[in-house]
Image (spheres, grey):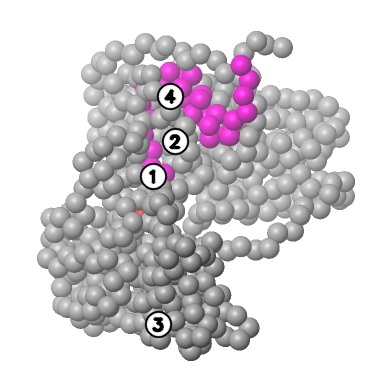
Amino acid sequence: MSDKKRVIMLGNEAIARGAYEAGVKVSAAYPGTPSTEISEYLVQYKDGLYCEWSPNEKVATEVAVGASLAGTRAMACMKHVGFNVAADPAYSVSYMGVNGGLVIVVADDPGLYSSQNEQDTRMVARAAQLPVLEPSDSSEAKEFMKQAFELSEKFDRPFVFRTTTRLAHSQGIVELEAREEIEDKPYEKDIRRTVMMPANAKQRHVEIEKRNLELAEAANTLPINRVEMKDTKIGVITSGIPYQYVKEALPSASVLKLGMVNPLPKKLIAEFASKVEKLYIIEELDPVIEEQVRSWGIEAAGKELFTVQGEYSANMIRKAILGEALDIAAPAQVPGRPPILCPGCPHRSVYYVVKKLNLHVAGDIGCYTLGAVAPLSVVDTTMCMGSSISTLHGMEKAKGKEYIKNWVAAIGDSTFLHTGVNSLMNMAYNKSTGTVLILDNSTTGMTGHQDHAATGKTLQGEPAYAIDIPALCRAVGVRNVIEVNAFDLERLEAVIKEETARDEVSVIITKTPCVLLSKGKKPLYAAHEDKCKKCGMCMRPGCPAMTKRADGTIRIDDTMCTGCGLCKDLCKFGAIDLVKAGDR
Ligand SMILES: Cc1ncc(C[n+]2csc(CCOP(=O)(O)OP(=O)(O)O)c2C)c(N)n1
Protein backbone atom coordinates (compact mmCIF):
# COMPACT_ATOMS: atom_id res chain seq x y z
CA MET A 1 0.00 0.00 0.00
CA SER A 2 1.27 3.48 -0.78
CA ASP A 3 2.28 5.78 2.05
CA LYS A 4 0.35 8.68 0.53
CA LYS A 5 -2.31 10.23 2.70
CA ARG A 6 -5.75 8.88 1.83
CA VAL A 7 -8.89 10.86 2.57
CA ILE A 8 -12.58 10.62 1.80
CA MET A 9 -13.70 13.31 -0.59
CA LEU A 10 -16.83 14.39 -2.39
CA GLY A 11 -16.50 14.24 -6.17
CA ASN A 12 -16.49 18.04 -6.34
CA GLU A 13 -13.85 18.24 -3.62
CA ALA A 14 -11.71 15.74 -5.55
CA ILE A 15 -12.06 17.78 -8.75
CA ALA A 16 -10.80 20.82 -6.85
CA ARG A 17 -7.94 18.75 -5.43
CA GLY A 18 -7.05 17.52 -8.92
CA ALA A 19 -6.94 21.08 -10.20
CA TYR A 20 -4.77 22.11 -7.28
CA GLU A 21 -2.34 19.22 -7.76
CA ALA A 22 -2.26 19.90 -11.50
CA GLY A 23 -0.84 23.35 -10.74
CA VAL A 24 -3.87 25.33 -11.91
CA LYS A 25 -3.31 29.03 -11.38
CA VAL A 26 -6.64 30.54 -12.43
CA SER A 27 -10.18 29.26 -12.00
CA ALA A 28 -13.38 31.13 -12.85
CA ALA A 29 -16.91 29.89 -12.33
CA TYR A 30 -20.54 30.79 -12.01
CA PRO A 31 -22.48 28.74 -9.42
CA GLY A 32 -24.84 26.02 -10.59
CA THR A 33 -25.82 22.75 -8.98
CA PRO A 34 -24.11 20.26 -9.08
CA SER A 35 -20.87 22.14 -9.86
CA THR A 36 -20.86 24.90 -7.25
CA GLU A 37 -18.72 23.31 -4.53
CA ILE A 38 -15.74 22.86 -6.86
CA SER A 39 -14.92 26.57 -6.53
CA GLU A 40 -15.81 26.61 -2.84
CA TYR A 41 -13.25 23.85 -2.23
CA LEU A 42 -10.68 25.23 -4.63
CA VAL A 43 -10.60 28.65 -3.00
CA GLN A 44 -9.38 26.99 0.18
CA TYR A 45 -6.05 26.20 -1.55
CA LYS A 46 -4.44 29.55 -1.22
CA ASP A 47 -0.91 29.13 -2.56
CA GLY A 48 -0.46 30.44 -6.07
CA LEU A 49 -4.04 29.88 -7.12
CA TYR A 50 -6.64 32.49 -8.01
CA CYS A 51 -10.39 31.69 -8.03
CA GLU A 52 -13.38 33.86 -8.75
CA TRP A 53 -17.12 33.95 -9.17
CA SER A 54 -17.68 35.52 -12.54
CA PRO A 55 -21.07 37.05 -13.41
CA ASN A 56 -21.87 34.24 -15.85
CA GLU A 57 -20.37 31.20 -17.56
CA LYS A 58 -19.38 33.01 -20.74
CA VAL A 59 -17.29 35.44 -18.74
CA ALA A 60 -15.85 32.60 -16.62
CA THR A 61 -14.77 30.70 -19.75
CA GLU A 62 -13.19 33.78 -21.29
CA VAL A 63 -11.29 34.47 -18.06
CA ALA A 64 -9.92 30.92 -18.17
CA VAL A 65 -9.04 31.29 -21.87
CA GLY A 66 -7.15 34.50 -21.09
CA ALA A 67 -5.18 32.78 -18.35
CA SER A 68 -4.40 29.85 -20.64
CA LEU A 69 -3.24 32.15 -23.44
CA ALA A 70 -0.99 33.92 -20.94
CA GLY A 71 0.67 30.56 -20.33
CA THR A 72 -0.82 29.15 -17.11
CA ARG A 73 -3.06 26.17 -16.44
CA ALA A 74 -6.61 27.45 -16.11
CA MET A 75 -10.15 26.17 -15.69
CA ALA A 76 -13.77 27.25 -15.74
CA CYS A 77 -16.60 25.46 -13.90
CA MET A 78 -20.33 25.44 -14.53
CA LYS A 79 -23.44 23.34 -14.71
CA HIS A 80 -24.64 21.89 -18.00
CA VAL A 81 -26.96 24.77 -18.90
CA GLY A 82 -24.14 27.16 -18.11
CA PHE A 83 -22.18 25.51 -20.90
CA ASN A 84 -24.79 26.88 -23.31
CA VAL A 85 -24.08 30.37 -22.01
CA ALA A 86 -20.36 29.65 -22.50
CA ALA A 87 -20.91 28.11 -25.92
CA ASP A 88 -19.75 31.14 -27.86
CA PRO A 89 -16.19 31.23 -26.48
CA ALA A 90 -16.14 27.41 -26.17
CA TYR A 91 -16.73 26.81 -29.89
CA SER A 92 -14.06 29.30 -30.87
CA VAL A 93 -11.40 28.45 -28.29
CA SER A 94 -11.76 24.94 -29.68
CA TYR A 95 -10.26 26.33 -32.91
CA MET A 96 -7.67 28.43 -31.10
CA GLY A 97 -6.22 25.71 -28.90
CA VAL A 98 -4.35 26.43 -25.69
CA ASN A 99 -1.08 27.71 -24.31
CA GLY A 100 -1.33 26.65 -20.66
CA GLY A 101 -3.66 23.64 -20.23
CA LEU A 102 -7.34 24.61 -20.32
CA VAL A 103 -10.18 22.59 -18.80
CA ILE A 104 -13.89 23.42 -18.73
CA VAL A 105 -15.60 21.43 -15.99
CA VAL A 106 -19.27 20.87 -16.79
CA ALA A 107 -21.67 19.12 -14.42
CA ASP A 108 -24.69 17.36 -15.90
CA ASP A 109 -27.85 16.62 -13.97
CA PRO A 110 -29.48 13.37 -15.14
CA GLY A 111 -32.76 13.13 -13.27
CA LEU A 112 -33.11 16.93 -13.07
CA TYR A 113 -32.54 17.24 -9.34
CA SER A 114 -32.07 20.98 -9.71
CA SER A 115 -32.17 21.99 -13.35
CA GLN A 116 -34.52 23.17 -16.04
CA ASN A 117 -33.47 20.54 -18.59
CA GLU A 118 -31.54 17.31 -18.85
CA GLN A 119 -29.15 18.04 -21.70
CA ASP A 120 -26.08 15.88 -22.25
CA THR A 121 -22.85 17.87 -22.26
CA ARG A 122 -21.16 15.28 -24.46
CA MET A 123 -23.46 16.37 -27.30
CA VAL A 124 -22.51 20.04 -26.91
CA ALA A 125 -18.82 19.16 -26.60
CA ARG A 126 -18.97 16.98 -29.72
CA ALA A 127 -20.60 19.78 -31.65
CA ALA A 128 -17.82 22.12 -30.53
CA GLN A 129 -15.23 19.39 -31.30
CA LEU A 130 -13.97 19.49 -27.75
CA PRO A 131 -12.49 16.35 -26.18
CA VAL A 132 -14.23 15.09 -23.04
CA LEU A 133 -12.98 13.15 -20.01
CA GLU A 134 -15.45 11.58 -17.61
CA PRO A 135 -14.50 10.03 -14.24
CA SER A 136 -16.43 7.34 -12.34
CA ASP A 137 -15.54 8.15 -8.73
CA SER A 138 -13.73 10.67 -6.54
CA SER A 139 -10.33 9.06 -7.02
CA GLU A 140 -10.65 9.22 -10.79
CA ALA A 141 -12.07 12.74 -10.54
CA LYS A 142 -8.78 13.90 -9.06
CA GLU A 143 -6.58 11.82 -11.38
CA PHE A 144 -8.49 12.67 -14.53
CA MET A 145 -8.29 16.38 -13.79
CA LYS A 146 -4.52 16.09 -13.82
CA GLN A 147 -4.63 14.10 -17.02
CA ALA A 148 -7.00 16.57 -18.62
CA PHE A 149 -4.42 19.34 -18.17
CA GLU A 150 -1.60 17.17 -19.48
CA LEU A 151 -3.57 16.05 -22.52
CA SER A 152 -4.78 19.60 -23.13
CA GLU A 153 -1.19 20.79 -23.43
CA LYS A 154 0.05 17.74 -25.32
CA PHE A 155 -2.65 17.87 -28.00
CA ASP A 156 -3.23 21.62 -27.91
CA ARG A 157 -6.94 21.16 -27.18
CA PRO A 158 -9.16 22.68 -24.50
CA PHE A 159 -10.73 19.78 -22.61
CA VAL A 160 -14.21 19.36 -21.21
CA PHE A 161 -14.38 17.51 -17.92
CA ARG A 162 -17.85 16.03 -17.55
CA THR A 163 -19.35 15.07 -14.21
CA THR A 164 -22.87 14.33 -13.06
CA THR A 165 -24.84 14.98 -9.87
CA ARG A 166 -24.18 11.46 -8.54
CA LEU A 167 -20.43 11.85 -8.91
CA ALA A 168 -20.29 15.46 -7.72
CA HIS A 169 -22.16 14.70 -4.53
CA SER A 170 -20.98 11.22 -3.56
CA GLN A 171 -17.84 10.39 -1.64
CA GLY A 172 -14.86 8.15 -2.31
CA ILE A 173 -11.27 7.61 -1.23
CA VAL A 174 -8.64 9.86 -2.73
CA GLU A 175 -4.86 9.68 -2.38
CA LEU A 176 -3.34 13.09 -1.86
CA GLU A 177 -0.26 14.11 -3.80
CA ALA A 178 1.81 17.27 -3.90
CA ARG A 179 0.97 20.16 -6.18
CA GLU A 180 2.95 20.08 -9.40
CA GLU A 181 4.95 23.22 -9.87
CA ILE A 182 4.27 23.92 -13.51
CA GLU A 183 6.33 26.61 -15.14
CA ASP A 184 4.33 29.16 -17.09
CA LYS A 185 4.62 28.82 -20.85
CA PRO A 186 5.98 31.88 -22.63
CA TYR A 187 3.42 33.96 -24.50
CA GLU A 188 4.24 34.20 -28.17
CA LYS A 189 2.13 36.37 -30.38
CA ASP A 190 0.64 34.27 -33.18
CA ILE A 191 -2.50 35.78 -34.59
CA ARG A 192 -3.07 32.83 -36.91
CA ARG A 193 -4.20 30.90 -33.86
CA THR A 194 -5.53 33.62 -31.61
CA VAL A 195 -7.41 35.96 -33.95
CA MET A 196 -10.41 34.02 -35.17
CA MET A 197 -11.22 35.88 -38.34
CA PRO A 198 -12.30 33.83 -41.33
CA ALA A 199 -8.93 33.30 -43.01
CA ASN A 200 -7.29 32.18 -39.76
CA ALA A 201 -10.27 30.18 -38.49
CA LYS A 202 -10.40 28.27 -41.79
CA GLN A 203 -6.84 27.10 -41.26
CA ARG A 204 -7.43 26.34 -37.61
CA HIS A 205 -10.44 24.22 -38.48
CA VAL A 206 -8.20 22.05 -40.64
CA GLU A 207 -5.65 21.91 -37.84
CA ILE A 208 -8.06 20.91 -35.10
CA GLU A 209 -9.58 18.18 -37.24
CA LYS A 210 -6.04 16.81 -37.48
CA ARG A 211 -5.47 17.16 -33.74
CA ASN A 212 -8.73 15.40 -32.97
CA LEU A 213 -7.76 12.50 -35.24
CA GLU A 214 -4.44 12.23 -33.43
CA LEU A 215 -6.25 12.29 -30.12
CA ALA A 216 -8.73 9.65 -31.29
CA GLU A 217 -5.79 7.45 -32.28
CA ALA A 218 -4.07 8.02 -28.93
CA ALA A 219 -7.34 7.20 -27.14
CA ASN A 220 -6.88 3.56 -28.23
CA THR A 221 -3.94 3.18 -25.87
CA LEU A 222 -4.62 5.75 -23.15
CA PRO A 223 -4.82 3.92 -19.79
CA ILE A 224 -7.97 5.89 -18.88
CA ASN A 225 -9.77 3.76 -21.48
CA ARG A 226 -9.42 0.30 -20.03
CA VAL A 227 -10.68 -3.18 -20.77
CA GLU A 228 -11.67 -5.46 -17.89
CA MET A 229 -11.95 -8.82 -19.59
CA LYS A 230 -14.05 -11.48 -17.84
CA ASP A 231 -16.79 -13.75 -19.19
CA THR A 232 -17.18 -12.97 -22.89
CA LYS A 233 -20.90 -13.76 -23.11
CA ILE A 234 -21.72 -10.20 -22.18
CA GLY A 235 -19.58 -7.18 -23.01
CA VAL A 236 -20.44 -3.67 -21.88
CA ILE A 237 -19.08 -0.34 -23.01
CA THR A 238 -19.73 2.28 -20.38
CA SER A 239 -18.26 5.32 -18.61
CA GLY A 240 -18.81 7.66 -15.68
CA ILE A 241 -21.21 6.70 -12.91
CA PRO A 242 -23.00 3.99 -14.96
CA TYR A 243 -19.69 2.03 -14.78
CA GLN A 244 -20.32 1.60 -11.03
CA TYR A 245 -23.82 0.29 -11.68
CA VAL A 246 -22.55 -2.11 -14.36
CA LYS A 247 -19.94 -3.57 -11.99
CA GLU A 248 -22.62 -4.22 -9.40
CA ALA A 249 -25.30 -5.46 -11.76
CA LEU A 250 -23.13 -7.65 -13.99
CA PRO A 251 -20.07 -8.67 -11.95
CA SER A 252 -18.96 -11.34 -14.41
CA ALA A 253 -19.37 -9.30 -17.60
CA SER A 254 -16.44 -7.97 -19.61
CA VAL A 255 -16.30 -4.20 -19.54
CA LEU A 256 -14.69 -1.52 -21.66
CA LYS A 257 -14.60 1.46 -19.36
CA LEU A 258 -14.09 4.73 -21.20
CA GLY A 259 -12.42 7.61 -19.38
CA MET A 260 -12.32 9.66 -22.57
CA VAL A 261 -15.80 9.85 -24.06
CA ASN A 262 -14.92 12.15 -26.94
CA PRO A 263 -13.26 11.30 -29.26
CA LEU A 264 -13.90 7.58 -28.96
CA PRO A 265 -11.16 4.92 -29.33
CA LYS A 266 -12.50 3.24 -32.47
CA LYS A 267 -9.92 0.45 -32.69
CA LEU A 268 -10.18 -0.41 -29.01
CA ILE A 269 -13.97 -0.54 -29.27
CA ALA A 270 -13.91 -2.69 -32.42
CA GLU A 271 -11.45 -5.08 -30.81
CA PHE A 272 -13.50 -5.34 -27.64
CA ALA A 273 -16.71 -5.85 -29.63
CA SER A 274 -15.09 -8.69 -31.58
CA LYS A 275 -14.27 -10.55 -28.36
CA VAL A 276 -17.73 -10.60 -26.77
CA GLU A 277 -20.86 -12.47 -27.82
CA LYS A 278 -23.34 -9.71 -27.05
CA LEU A 279 -22.36 -6.06 -26.76
CA TYR A 280 -24.28 -3.53 -24.67
CA ILE A 281 -23.67 0.19 -24.44
CA ILE A 282 -24.77 1.64 -21.14
CA GLU A 283 -24.71 5.42 -20.85
CA GLU A 284 -27.06 7.80 -19.05
CA LEU A 285 -28.91 10.41 -21.13
CA ASP A 286 -28.20 10.48 -24.86
CA PRO A 287 -26.94 7.58 -27.03
CA VAL A 288 -23.68 9.38 -27.74
CA ILE A 289 -21.38 6.35 -27.67
CA GLU A 290 -24.04 4.04 -29.07
CA GLU A 291 -24.77 6.04 -32.21
CA GLN A 292 -21.10 6.35 -33.09
CA VAL A 293 -20.39 2.69 -32.47
CA ARG A 294 -23.37 1.62 -34.56
CA SER A 295 -22.33 4.02 -37.32
CA TRP A 296 -19.10 2.01 -37.58
CA GLY A 297 -21.15 -1.10 -38.36
CA ILE A 298 -20.68 -2.62 -34.91
CA GLU A 299 -23.78 -4.29 -33.53
CA ALA A 300 -24.73 -3.23 -30.02
CA ALA A 301 -27.78 -3.02 -27.81
CA GLY A 302 -28.47 0.26 -26.04
CA LYS A 303 -31.35 2.66 -25.87
CA GLU A 304 -33.92 0.07 -26.95
CA LEU A 305 -33.36 -1.29 -23.43
CA PHE A 306 -32.45 1.87 -21.54
CA THR A 307 -34.09 5.23 -21.24
CA VAL A 308 -32.67 8.59 -22.30
CA GLN A 309 -34.18 10.08 -19.15
CA GLY A 310 -33.00 10.24 -15.57
CA GLU A 311 -30.41 8.30 -13.63
CA TYR A 312 -29.75 4.59 -14.03
CA SER A 313 -29.24 2.07 -11.21
CA ALA A 314 -27.60 -1.32 -10.83
CA ASN A 315 -31.00 -2.90 -10.40
CA MET A 316 -32.42 -1.40 -13.55
CA ILE A 317 -29.41 -2.58 -15.58
CA ARG A 318 -29.61 -6.11 -14.22
CA LYS A 319 -33.33 -6.31 -14.91
CA ALA A 320 -32.90 -5.00 -18.46
CA ILE A 321 -30.08 -7.39 -19.35
CA LEU A 322 -30.66 -10.49 -17.24
CA GLY A 323 -34.37 -10.09 -16.58
CA GLU A 324 -33.90 -10.41 -12.84
CA ALA A 325 -33.61 -7.96 -9.98
CA LEU A 326 -30.62 -7.66 -7.64
CA ASP A 327 -30.98 -9.21 -4.23
CA ILE A 328 -30.94 -5.95 -2.30
CA ALA A 329 -33.20 -4.44 0.33
CA ALA A 330 -35.87 -2.18 -1.09
CA PRO A 331 -34.91 1.46 -0.59
CA ALA A 332 -36.58 3.19 2.35
CA GLN A 333 -39.70 5.06 1.31
CA VAL A 334 -39.58 8.74 2.16
CA PRO A 335 -42.47 11.12 1.74
CA GLY A 336 -42.30 13.46 -1.25
CA ARG A 337 -41.03 16.82 -0.04
CA PRO A 338 -41.37 19.32 -2.87
CA PRO A 339 -39.21 22.42 -2.48
CA ILE A 340 -40.90 25.47 -0.99
CA LEU A 341 -39.93 29.03 -0.17
CA CYS A 342 -38.43 29.16 3.34
CA PRO A 343 -40.41 30.65 6.23
CA GLY A 344 -39.53 34.36 6.24
CA CYS A 345 -38.43 34.40 2.56
CA PRO A 346 -38.86 37.94 1.19
CA HIS A 347 -39.98 36.52 -2.17
CA ARG A 348 -43.18 35.26 -0.51
CA SER A 349 -44.48 38.67 0.49
CA VAL A 350 -43.69 40.13 -2.95
CA TYR A 351 -45.60 37.31 -4.61
CA TYR A 352 -48.46 37.73 -2.14
CA VAL A 353 -48.93 41.28 -3.41
CA VAL A 354 -48.50 40.24 -7.06
CA LYS A 355 -51.19 37.61 -6.57
CA LYS A 356 -53.48 40.05 -4.83
CA LEU A 357 -53.18 42.35 -7.85
CA ASN A 358 -53.97 39.44 -10.14
CA LEU A 359 -50.82 39.87 -12.19
CA HIS A 360 -49.07 37.33 -14.39
CA VAL A 361 -45.34 36.84 -13.87
CA ALA A 362 -42.76 36.26 -16.58
CA GLY A 363 -40.43 34.40 -14.25
CA ASP A 364 -36.80 33.48 -14.12
CA ILE A 365 -34.49 31.00 -12.42
CA GLY A 366 -33.81 31.19 -8.70
CA CYS A 367 -35.60 30.49 -5.42
CA TYR A 368 -38.39 32.74 -6.69
CA THR A 369 -39.24 30.16 -9.37
CA LEU A 370 -41.09 28.48 -6.50
CA GLY A 371 -43.75 31.17 -6.86
CA ALA A 372 -45.08 28.92 -9.64
CA VAL A 373 -46.48 26.39 -7.19
CA ALA A 374 -49.54 26.53 -4.94
CA PRO A 375 -50.66 28.35 -3.00
CA LEU A 376 -48.92 31.34 -4.63
CA SER A 377 -49.19 30.08 -8.24
CA VAL A 378 -48.22 33.44 -9.69
CA VAL A 379 -45.33 32.55 -12.01
CA ASP A 380 -46.36 31.83 -15.61
CA THR A 381 -42.98 31.21 -17.29
CA THR A 382 -39.50 29.94 -16.39
CA MET A 383 -37.07 29.12 -19.17
CA CYS A 384 -33.45 30.09 -18.59
CA MET A 385 -31.45 32.63 -16.64
CA GLY A 386 -32.19 36.22 -17.65
CA SER A 387 -35.17 35.34 -19.82
CA SER A 388 -37.94 36.92 -17.72
CA ILE A 389 -37.27 40.47 -18.86
CA SER A 390 -36.89 39.71 -22.57
CA THR A 391 -39.95 37.44 -22.53
CA LEU A 392 -42.05 40.28 -21.16
CA HIS A 393 -40.61 42.59 -23.81
CA GLY A 394 -41.54 40.10 -26.55
CA MET A 395 -45.08 39.88 -25.24
CA GLU A 396 -45.45 43.63 -25.37
CA LYS A 397 -44.10 43.80 -28.92
CA ALA A 398 -46.59 41.12 -29.95
CA LYS A 399 -49.67 42.40 -28.16
CA GLY A 400 -49.10 46.04 -27.24
CA LYS A 401 -48.61 47.92 -24.02
CA GLU A 402 -52.16 47.46 -22.67
CA TYR A 403 -51.76 43.69 -22.82
CA ILE A 404 -48.78 43.66 -20.45
CA LYS A 405 -50.32 45.99 -17.88
CA ASN A 406 -51.27 42.90 -15.90
CA TRP A 407 -47.85 41.33 -16.30
CA VAL A 408 -44.54 41.86 -14.51
CA ALA A 409 -41.14 40.23 -14.98
CA ALA A 410 -39.54 38.84 -11.79
CA ILE A 411 -35.80 38.17 -11.53
CA GLY A 412 -33.27 37.73 -8.72
CA ASP A 413 -30.18 39.87 -8.14
CA SER A 414 -27.67 37.20 -9.20
CA THR A 415 -29.69 36.32 -12.28
CA PHE A 416 -30.12 40.00 -13.14
CA LEU A 417 -26.34 40.43 -13.18
CA HIS A 418 -25.85 37.09 -15.01
CA THR A 419 -27.84 37.95 -18.14
CA GLY A 420 -30.90 39.95 -17.05
CA VAL A 421 -29.15 43.28 -17.44
CA ASN A 422 -28.77 42.75 -21.21
CA SER A 423 -32.51 42.24 -21.49
CA LEU A 424 -33.17 45.38 -19.49
CA MET A 425 -30.92 47.34 -21.87
CA ASN A 426 -33.04 46.00 -24.67
CA MET A 427 -36.26 47.05 -22.97
CA ALA A 428 -35.02 50.59 -22.47
CA TYR A 429 -33.52 50.82 -25.96
CA ASN A 430 -36.52 49.37 -27.75
CA LYS A 431 -39.09 51.43 -25.87
CA SER A 432 -40.77 48.85 -23.69
CA THR A 433 -43.25 49.95 -21.07
CA GLY A 434 -43.12 46.81 -18.91
CA THR A 435 -42.43 46.50 -15.19
CA VAL A 436 -39.52 44.46 -13.88
CA LEU A 437 -39.29 43.30 -10.27
CA ILE A 438 -35.73 42.65 -9.15
CA LEU A 439 -36.08 40.46 -6.06
CA ASP A 440 -32.78 41.50 -4.52
CA ASN A 441 -32.01 39.26 -1.53
CA SER A 442 -28.29 40.14 -1.59
CA THR A 443 -27.12 36.66 -2.53
CA THR A 444 -27.31 33.78 -4.98
CA GLY A 445 -29.80 31.96 -2.79
CA MET A 446 -30.81 28.94 -4.82
CA THR A 447 -27.32 27.52 -5.20
CA GLY A 448 -26.35 28.01 -1.55
CA HIS A 449 -25.52 31.69 -0.98
CA GLN A 450 -22.66 32.55 -3.25
CA ASP A 451 -21.48 36.13 -3.50
CA HIS A 452 -21.78 38.10 -6.72
CA ALA A 453 -20.77 41.46 -8.10
CA ALA A 454 -23.38 43.34 -6.04
CA THR A 455 -22.82 41.70 -2.64
CA GLY A 456 -19.58 43.52 -1.87
CA LYS A 457 -17.59 40.32 -1.28
CA THR A 458 -15.40 38.09 -3.44
CA LEU A 459 -15.24 34.29 -3.48
CA GLN A 460 -12.37 34.66 -1.00
CA GLY A 461 -14.71 36.61 1.31
CA GLU A 462 -12.70 39.80 0.78
CA PRO A 463 -14.46 43.15 0.54
CA ALA A 464 -15.06 44.28 -3.04
CA TYR A 465 -16.88 46.99 -4.94
CA ALA A 466 -20.62 46.28 -4.78
CA ILE A 467 -22.51 47.18 -7.94
CA ASP A 468 -25.28 49.65 -7.23
CA ILE A 469 -28.20 47.86 -8.91
CA PRO A 470 -30.56 50.88 -8.97
CA ALA A 471 -27.79 53.00 -10.53
CA LEU A 472 -27.09 50.24 -13.06
CA CYS A 473 -30.76 50.20 -14.07
CA ARG A 474 -30.73 53.97 -14.50
CA ALA A 475 -27.51 53.76 -16.50
CA VAL A 476 -29.10 51.47 -19.08
CA GLY A 477 -31.91 53.96 -19.56
CA VAL A 478 -34.64 53.11 -17.05
CA ARG A 479 -35.96 56.34 -15.57
CA ASN A 480 -38.37 54.78 -13.08
CA VAL A 481 -36.34 52.84 -10.56
CA ILE A 482 -37.98 52.34 -7.18
CA GLU A 483 -36.63 50.53 -4.13
CA VAL A 484 -39.12 48.97 -1.71
CA ASN A 485 -38.78 46.75 1.32
CA ALA A 486 -40.22 43.35 0.36
CA PHE A 487 -42.24 43.24 3.59
CA ASP A 488 -43.77 46.70 3.23
CA LEU A 489 -46.99 45.33 1.75
CA GLU A 490 -48.83 48.62 1.45
CA ARG A 491 -46.06 50.46 -0.32
CA LEU A 492 -45.28 47.49 -2.51
CA GLU A 493 -48.89 47.29 -3.65
CA ALA A 494 -49.06 51.01 -4.36
CA VAL A 495 -45.78 51.01 -6.28
CA ILE A 496 -46.61 47.95 -8.39
CA LYS A 497 -50.02 49.46 -9.28
CA GLU A 498 -48.46 52.76 -10.23
CA GLU A 499 -45.60 51.29 -12.28
CA THR A 500 -47.64 48.73 -14.19
CA ALA A 501 -50.04 51.54 -15.17
CA ARG A 502 -47.19 53.71 -16.40
CA ASP A 503 -46.44 53.85 -20.13
CA GLU A 504 -42.71 53.58 -19.54
CA VAL A 505 -40.34 50.84 -18.50
CA SER A 506 -39.95 50.59 -14.71
CA VAL A 507 -37.83 48.60 -12.30
CA ILE A 508 -39.00 47.88 -8.77
CA ILE A 509 -36.20 46.55 -6.58
CA THR A 510 -37.46 44.69 -3.52
CA LYS A 511 -34.27 44.86 -1.49
CA THR A 512 -34.54 42.57 1.55
CA PRO A 513 -31.81 40.04 2.48
CA CYS A 514 -32.42 36.31 2.23
CA VAL A 515 -33.74 35.12 5.57
CA LEU A 516 -30.98 32.51 5.79
CA LEU A 517 -28.28 35.18 5.69
CA SER A 518 -29.13 36.52 9.14
CA LYS A 519 -27.89 34.12 11.74
CA GLY A 520 -28.94 36.10 14.82
CA LYS A 521 -31.87 35.27 17.08
CA LYS A 522 -35.09 36.46 15.53
CA PRO A 523 -38.37 37.59 17.04
CA LEU A 524 -41.22 35.10 16.96
CA TYR A 525 -44.88 35.49 16.25
CA ALA A 526 -47.70 33.56 17.87
CA ALA A 527 -51.37 33.26 17.01
CA HIS A 528 -54.02 33.83 19.71
CA GLU A 529 -56.80 31.31 19.37
CA ASP A 530 -59.33 33.52 21.10
CA LYS A 531 -58.91 36.40 18.65
CA CYS A 532 -58.62 34.24 15.50
CA LYS A 533 -61.66 34.60 13.24
CA LYS A 534 -60.58 31.68 11.02
CA CYS A 535 -60.64 33.90 7.94
CA GLY A 536 -57.52 32.23 6.50
CA MET A 537 -55.88 35.49 5.32
CA CYS A 538 -52.61 34.69 7.08
CA MET A 539 -52.47 31.30 5.35
CA ARG A 540 -52.64 32.72 1.84
CA PRO A 541 -48.92 33.26 1.26
CA GLY A 542 -48.30 29.62 2.15
CA CYS A 543 -45.76 30.07 4.96
CA PRO A 544 -44.63 26.60 6.10
CA ALA A 545 -44.57 27.76 9.75
CA MET A 546 -48.39 28.18 9.74
CA THR A 547 -50.83 25.34 10.30
CA LYS A 548 -54.57 25.22 10.80
CA ARG A 549 -55.96 23.40 13.82
CA ALA A 550 -58.97 21.11 13.47
CA ASP A 551 -61.23 23.95 14.68
CA GLY A 552 -59.91 26.28 11.96
CA THR A 553 -57.77 28.49 14.20
CA ILE A 554 -54.13 29.07 13.36
CA ARG A 555 -50.99 27.80 14.99
CA ILE A 556 -47.49 29.13 14.29
CA ASP A 557 -44.64 26.64 14.66
CA ASP A 558 -42.06 28.52 16.70
CA THR A 559 -39.23 26.29 15.49
CA MET A 560 -39.89 27.52 11.96
CA CYS A 561 -41.02 31.12 12.44
CA THR A 562 -38.32 33.59 11.50
CA GLY A 563 -40.22 36.66 12.62
CA CYS A 564 -40.77 38.24 9.20
CA GLY A 565 -44.17 39.52 10.35
CA LEU A 566 -45.99 38.86 7.07
CA CYS A 567 -48.77 36.91 8.81
CA LYS A 568 -49.17 39.62 11.45
CA ASP A 569 -49.55 42.26 8.75
CA LEU A 570 -52.24 40.19 7.05
CA CYS A 571 -54.29 39.60 10.20
CA LYS A 572 -56.97 42.29 10.59
CA PHE A 573 -58.09 41.04 14.01
CA GLY A 574 -54.87 41.37 15.98
CA ALA A 575 -54.74 37.61 16.46
CA ILE A 576 -51.04 37.40 15.60
CA ASP A 577 -48.52 39.01 17.88
CA LEU A 578 -44.83 39.21 18.62
CA VAL A 579 -43.88 36.89 21.45
CA LYS A 580 -41.39 38.19 23.95
CA ALA A 581 -38.36 36.03 24.55
CA GLY A 582 -39.57 34.92 27.99
CA ASP A 583 -43.02 33.86 26.74
CA ARG A 584 -41.77 31.19 24.37
C1 LIG B 1 -27.08 29.19 -17.02
C2 LIG B 1 -27.32 28.79 -15.61
N1 LIG B 1 -26.33 28.95 -14.72
C3 LIG B 1 -26.52 28.62 -13.42
C4 LIG B 1 -27.73 28.11 -13.02
C5 LIG B 1 -27.94 27.71 -11.56
N2 LIG B 1 -28.76 28.71 -10.87
C6 LIG B 1 -30.08 28.53 -10.73
S1 LIG B 1 -30.80 29.86 -10.06
C7 LIG B 1 -29.38 30.68 -9.89
C8 LIG B 1 -29.29 32.07 -9.32
C9 LIG B 1 -30.16 32.33 -8.18
O1 LIG B 1 -29.85 33.55 -7.60
P1 LIG B 1 -30.80 34.81 -7.66
O2 LIG B 1 -31.19 35.13 -9.03
O3 LIG B 1 -30.15 35.91 -6.91
O4 LIG B 1 -32.12 34.31 -6.91
P2 LIG B 1 -32.32 33.66 -5.46
O5 LIG B 1 -32.20 32.18 -5.60
O6 LIG B 1 -31.30 34.26 -4.53
O7 LIG B 1 -33.71 34.03 -5.08
C10 LIG B 1 -28.35 29.91 -10.37
C11 LIG B 1 -26.96 30.33 -10.33
C12 LIG B 1 -28.74 27.95 -14.00
N3 LIG B 1 -29.93 27.44 -13.71
N4 LIG B 1 -28.50 28.31 -15.26
The earlier-in-sequence mark between 2 and 4 is 2
Residue 211: give its label.
none
**Distance in Å between CA atoms under marks 1 and 2:** 9 Å
User: Which residue position holds label 4?
Assistant: 45
The residue range painted magenta reads 5-31
Residue 263, position as x, y percentages in the image: 55, 31
In this view, the residue in front, 581 or 20, is: 581
Q: Amino acid at mark 2?
A: Glu
User: Which residue position holds label 2?
Assistant: 40
Q: Quadrant of residue 573?
A: bottom left
For residue 312, above or below residue 500: above
Q: For the residue carrying disc 3, how many other residues have a C-alpha within 10 Å: few (<14), some (14-19), or many (20+)?
A: some
User: Which residue position holds label 3?
Assistant: 574
Residue 391, position as x, y percentages in the image: 32, 67
**Distance in Å between CA atoms under marks 2 and 4:** 10 Å
Find out whether the residues at labels 1 and 2 contact each other: C-beta distance under 8 Å: yes
